[in-house]
Image (tube, rainbow, N blue to C red):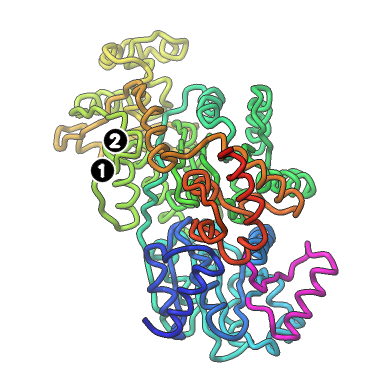
Amino acid sequence: MSASLATANDLLHSVFGFNGFRPGQEEIVQAVLDGENVLAIMPTGSGKSLCYQLPALARPGLTLVVSPLIALMRDQVRALSAAGVAAGSLNSSNDPAENARVLRLLRQRELRLLYVAPERLSRPDTLEMLCESDVRMMAIDEAHCVSQWGHDFRPEYLSLGSVARQIGGRLQTMALTATADSPTRGDIVDKLFAAPPRTFVRSFDRPNLRLAFKPKERSSRQVLAFVREHEGQSGIVYCASRRKVGELAETLRKEGINALPYHAGLDKQVRDAHQDAFQQQDGVVMTATVAFGMGIDKPDVRFVCHADLPANVEAYYQEIGRAGRDGLPADTLTLYGLGDMQLRRVQIEQSETPDERKRVERQRLNALLALAEAPRCRRQTLLAYFGESSQPCGNCDLCQDGVERFDGTIEAQKAMSAIVRTGERFGVEHLVAILTGERTENVLKYNHDRLPTFGVGKDRRAAEWRSIFRQLSAAGLIQQDFLEHGRWMVTEAGWQVLKGGQDIELRKETAPAKVSREKRAAAASVVLGETDNALLASLKTLRARLAQAQRVPAYVVFSDRTLIELATHRPDSPGAMREIHGVGDAKLERYGSAFLEVIQNSVR
């Protein structure tokens, strides 16, 4: 082990309270310590920030961290300060005293990490100050924001390559992101690095996350049932519209759930207050648009629910990645329907982006639909999108509840025959009515009860036919024309099946198995083990009191994982407590006696 890496290992334990690196971290830290420029693509919760924080402490000089959101900077600075690290940020939310502290430490060259937003970084006065501050490395977080192929493009990121050259020609650069497909990676390399960096792509697998999708029935009730399964836990419910955000928050509050809305249409003071409540309190459920999330550094989010279909696989992966960042079991659920599919496709077609961008976005959406309608393990399907292979995971709805597949060629032919015989002019509800033999007003109006396909699908329920249409759409056999009221058309691939030239396997819609919730509880017990729940509750109460007094998020004091280990192992001395995950020297000195007292009192 090199001297620098040995120093980093010591700091890992003494400052952060960790006994070892997580998979993939050590190699990246070594490359940074060796002075290489690095692009690190690591899943949320894998410890990206430690890959630049440790080198910043292991060697002299200042590390500049570019972060897209003030909330993210604020939380990281709080956590570092609690661990005894000289860190600060420059942003518009700072009070004068904080800005004065940061500038003083900069002048004295005592600051080790400085967080700034790209907008602040491009200001001449900021650049002038940094040129005199011994900046050794610029770490660019959420680096996918530089790419117009990415789902969070921010034009301010485009100037960062130039900024790095102005601060110093030999400035080391590190870019980090949780999701980046090939086009996005290419943009990151081209726009942030003068020469190709050392690139690390870590596994996208998050085995502690349970993956589940369900067709929409009554989505508000489905969301409510899911949230009730996680009573007292922190979670996020994502919605496609501001209106739905407000409605769902109100629905959950009426049921006694501490739910708060968040979207860009709310007053900034309200948004900030709700985000602070979510960060600092246990058991808050945030109903939100995707405006909420990128800046969230809360490790104990126990569930993420999508009340509507996400935009694409990358967005889905990043949004569910906000759950379970502490490595403990977390739950995800995505609701979807044909209306969601149509909305997302309309958004792509009506955007003002170039045709090539639209083509890529269609491919990304189709990949998400394939995940939603997957007949086999969802994690295998998700990881395959990112170029990984895996065995069935045992921690998704399809693995746990099982799914029955069947040769759906005849059903597909019936559905597509109904499309063709009605002139490819109608939406799914009309087509389902024809197949099930329902004489609706429109069926009679157009004499579609006289078609050969009328009633040929009576053996299946309407819900089953809707599922078949979703699966045919996800498989690319049929598509909608969004400029003409969502009418369905058969694609070239669909004609191959319709003419008998190719078979297709479909998934049978079944009621969810009742054992799934018990299996989730069993998965949690693997981690919780012999934890004393009464002691854990007392430790959480103490943590909340300390966090409130310091006006910081609860996890800045100690994470859930640390409290669980304290309640399980019951350390009886500072030395024993020092071996608990997440207990570094500074936190032991600051909080150790208070937590040891609670543990000792529980034994009496």
Give coordinates of residue 308: x percent, y percent.
Answer: 52, 36
Q: Is residue 97 magenta?
A: yes
Give coordinates of residue 199: x percent, y percent.
Answer: 39, 74
Residue designated by label 1 = 392
User: Which quarter of the rendering shows the C terminus?
Assistant: top right
Give coordinates of residue 174: x percent, y percent.
Answer: 50, 76
Give coordinates of residue 479: x percent, y percent.
Answer: 37, 38
**Residue positioned most to the left:** 501
**Please, what is the three-letter code of the amino acid marked with disc 1?**
Pro
Q: Is residue 84 magenta?
A: yes
Q: Which residues are magenta?
A: 83-112
What secondary structure is found at the residue carrying circle 1? loop
Residue designated by label 2 = 399
Q: Is residue 356 visible?
A: no
Q: Which mark is residue 341?
A: none
Return the residue nearer the eye: 492 or 216.
216
